Structures are given as C-alpha cells and as structure tokens.
Image (cartoon, grey):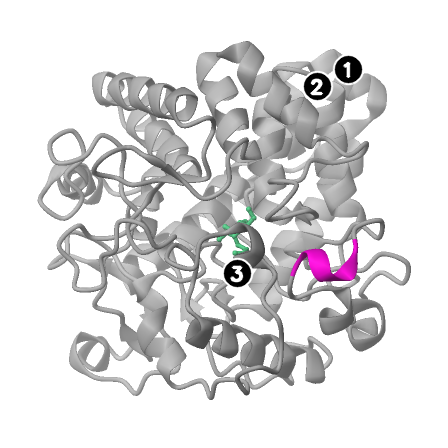
Amino acid sequence: MRRAACQVLLGNWTGSSTVPSHQLYPHQWSWDSAFIAIGLRHLSPVRAQQEVETLLAAQWGDGRVPHIVFNRAVPLDAYFPSPDFWRSSSAGAAAGAPRTTETSGVVQPPVHALAAWLVHSADPDTSARRGFLARVYPRLVAWHRYLADHRDLGGHGLAAVVHPWEPGMDNSPCWDGPLARVEPAAAGSFRRADLVHGSAADRPTDLDYRRYVRLAAEYRDHGYRDAEAPHSFAVEDPGFNALFIAAEYALARIAEALGGEAEPHRQRAAALTEALVERLWSPEAGQFLCRDLRAASGGRAARDGQGGRLVAERSAAGLLPLVAPQLPRPIVRTLLRTVSGEHYGLGTAVRLLPSYDLRGAAFDRHRYWRGPAWFNVNWLLERGLRRHGEEARADALAAEVLHAAAASGFAEYLDPYTGQGRGARGFSWTAALALDLLA
Ligand code: 9WN
C-alpha cells in the first residue's frame, strides 16, 4: 500500500508541485498542496518543502494565497475557469497579484502553517539546512493577516468565505440558501471542462456553476479588492475557521522554533476559538453551523444580535472544530456524540464520515460535497479524535480510511454507504493522507 500511495504521488509530481489529478485538476491547488505535503514528507521531505514553497511563491501582495496556481504548460481548455477568466496578473494588480504567474483570485482553507510545521518536523535537519521555516514563516504570517484584516466581514473575529470554492466544499447544501440570492451568469456563457472527465451526476449542477461564475467575475471586476467587492455571498464556515485555528497554533510552534514570539499566535488562536463558539455553535444541532452574513437577521441570530443567520444544514465542516485543541470540553463531548449519531452514523450506518447529514433533505450519496465521504475530512476527524483522547475511535477510523483508500485506488471520494470509489482515481491527497496514516 505504501508503494502504491508513493506511486500516485510520484506520478502526480510536476517538478515543483503536485497536481490533485492530471485530468480533472491539472494545476496546483492550495489546500490540496497542504495535504499533499503532509504525506509527501514521508517520501521526500525536500519535495514536501518545495510543494509548500511553490504555492507560497504565488502569494499576492495583500497576503492572500490563491486557491489555484496555474501551470502555463497546460492548455487553457483543460480546466475551467482558466487563467484568461481570472486574469489575475492584470485584474489583481492593485491587490498585489504576481506579475508573472497566473492564479485564481479566491482562497481555500488555511491548512498551510500546519502542513509547514509537520513537514519541518519530519526532517528538522534538512529543513534547517534549507532555511525552510525561516523562508515560509513571514509568508504564512502575511496569509493569516490577510484573513484577519480583509476577511472579517462579520466584524466579530472570524474569517468569511466569499465564494463556494473557498471552503473547498463547492456544492455543500450549506451554500444553497446563500447562493439562491446570486443572479446566475447566462447559460452558455462558459464551457465546463470538468464534465469531460467527471460524471455530471457527481459534479455540481450547471445552475451552481452559473452562480460560481457570477461571483468570481464580480470579484475580479472589483480588482479582487475586498473593501470594494460587493461580496454578495459571505459566510462564516466552521471548517475554514477551525483550520485557521489549528494553523495559528502551528504558527506558534514555528515562531518558537525560529526563536521568535509565539504568544501573539496563541492569543489569536484562542480569540478565534472563542469567536467560533460564540458565533457558530448550535446546541440544538449538536454541532457548529455556518453563518450566512448576507441573510436578514432572524430567529436565534436576531436574539443574540450577531448579524446574519445560522444556516440550518448539517455539514461535516461543523465537526471539524474537533481539530481545535482548546475547545470547551462540553462541546467536545457533544461533537463526539454527534459524529456517531443518526445524522452521520460513523461506525454504525457508515464506515467513513459523510460530508453531509445522512438524513438531510439534500443528501445525495454521489454528488460531491452533498453526501460522499472525503479523505481529507476523515483524516482531520481522525486527528481531532486523537487530540481529544479518543484513541480507540481514532485507530478504528484510521484503519477504515486506509482500507478504503487502497480498495478504491485512491479515489477522490466515496459513496458513504457502499464505500465505492467515485470521482478521480489516483487522487493526490487520498494517497498522501493514507501515507501519513501509515507512518
Ligand atoms: C474547484 C482540487 C479541488 C479541491 C476542492 C474540490 C474541487 C474544484 C473543482 O477540487 O474543487 O476548486 O473544480 O471542483 O471541491 O476541495 O481542492 O482537488
């Protein structure tokens, strides 16, 4: 299995970074690279460092780390939206987009500091010799500062996502409500490349895509400047912010290793944890929910005066705060119950955590982030279980992840009921995270 996972990673390596999948995603993706580096460190610590460095080399002047770094050798029609849609080097100039590398203009969850710390820890000598931490630290600090300064759209300390691609869970039912207010781009005004390799029954719908395109074009046409863009989609996502917290703690470790100041990072992580609980915890749901910042206030949100409204959909993103080390114990206990309760059924109805509520009206066992089980989410849950002392459950989940990864040929995602692989095969983060669990 180790050999097979390594082969996937070697095959998807392009010389300076790794594609998620040659056919469906032939460029470098932001959070994919973080997960890939976490696995790659067991195969080649130097390549794992390069993976992170290549991504961070495409960072914008305002600190954002783009969700895609385009490979200029790949034909434009291989992936949509392509560089000629984003036009980052011209449209993003005022926000400090790189001049010579084309990227997208949106972001993905900030897993990078965690990845950098884990990559360093795998081989501290090589890391020190290459000056890895010293080089990535200022960039990671600027990235987190971008999220804190430009993305706190709700004004209470959490980072908001402004496009469904940003939380990395493109068509989660959590976005259905917020997206309904977005005017779809004209049908036929673009050509989807994903349907050449992916099945239409699995992928987001055309109507979803028309709204994704509208939002991205709107952002681009405002120079990707957060102060000026209308951001008609703005959501506080518990998964995104949980990873921000974990990354901020990792940044504290990195600062310490460099002989710098760790305390400001720990303080920000603690403040983020507090805001997460205050704004997104739902005792009724037994998990964290998304907050739609553009919804008129009502219900609980009106009473607590927090602005916007909690989205009444259960997604696995609302369990990811288990990776946050300082979560209040009663909340941890509730989350641990929810994971194996009727909505997720881990260990009873299903073997891997599904991406969405098994009982939710929008549940679809094959459609991408509307039900299928994903390996990165399960790897994060495994880590969260272990962090909170649930060793036996973490061991059991790790065994299931490894079994499913191998049996599916390192699939992109799985039917949560049958374990049948779906989407791309030889998918990089599936191989990388399996390698990590084997280590
Ligand atoms: C849009 C690359 C990416 C992942 C995302 C996943 C999918 C892209 C797409 O693929 O999104 O960014 O074209 O569907 O949803 O999590 O990073 O693997």
Q: Please give the residue where the numbered disc 1 appears in the rendered image.
A: 126
Residue 194 appears at what percent x and percent y? Answer: 56, 57
Residue 206 appears at what percent x and percent y? Answer: 46, 72
**Mark 2 vs ligand 1: CB below 8 Å:** no
Question: Is the Cβ of the residue at disc 1 closer than 8 Å to that at disc 2?
Answer: yes
Separation (CA) of disc 2 from disc 3: 28 Å
Which span is picked out in magenta?
A: 75-79
Separation (CA) of disc 3 from disc 1: 33 Å
Q: Please give the residue where the numbered disc 2 appears in the rendered image.
A: 45
> Around disc 2, counting alpha carbons within 10 Å, would you say few (fewer than 14), some (14 to 19), or many (20 or more)?
many
Q: Residue at x 78, y 72 (%)?
A: 92
Q: Secondary structure at mark 3?
A: loop
- Is 151 left or right of 353, judged from the image as shown? right
Which of the pair 92/324 is nearer the observer?
92
Q: Amino acid at mark 2?
A: Pro
Q: Residue at x 68, y 26 (%)?
A: 11
The disc at residue 166 is 3
